[in-house]
Image: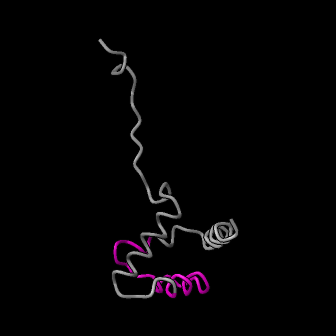
């Protein structure tokens, strides 16, 4: 008999916090685009103001963007730009 069944396996649910910032931002971008908004303007509006109503709730985009710290997002964007 296999030892594989003698130990308890731990199940870990994938959460939004485990999804990369890039994937989350891409999802938000796509959701805004699908709803007919200019994703760049809307995301910039959110970053500058902190007001989540700049982001559509379509495809859970508004909740996803709230999970990203705006300062961390700015750091990541600047880091990517300067590479």
Question: What residue is shown at x 58% (from left), y 82% (from top)?
Answer: 50
Q: Residue furthest top?
A: 1
Q: Check the image and report above or below for 11 versus 82.
A: above
Q: Residue 82: x percent and y percent?
A: 70, 69
Residue 21 lies left or right of residue 37; in this view the side is right
Asked whether 34 or 53 is in front, the reply is 34
Find the residue positioned furthest to the front: 83
- Residue sitting farthest toward the left: 1
Residue 64 location (% of width, % of height): 45, 69
Give the prevailing secondary structure in the magenta stretch.
helix
- Residue 77 placement (x, y as % from top left): 62, 71
In the rendered image, the residue lying farthest to the right is 82
Quadrant of the image containing the N terminus: top left
Task: Give the camera-side residue of 62 and 44.
Answer: 44
Q: How is the image coloured?
A: one colour
- Write the residue at 41% across / 51% down: 14
Asked if the magenta segment contains residue 6, the reply would be no
């Amino acid at each position: 008999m296999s030892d594989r069944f003698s130990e308890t396996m731990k199940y870990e649910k994938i959460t939004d916090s485990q999804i990369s910032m890039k994937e989350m931002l891409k999802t938000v971008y796509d959701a805004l685009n699908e709803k007919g908004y200019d994703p760049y303007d809307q995301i910039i509006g959110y970053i500058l103001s902190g007001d989540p109503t700049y982001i559509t709730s379509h495809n859970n985009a508004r909740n996803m963007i709230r999970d990203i710290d705006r300062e961390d997002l700015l750091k990541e964007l600047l880091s990517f730009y300067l590479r």
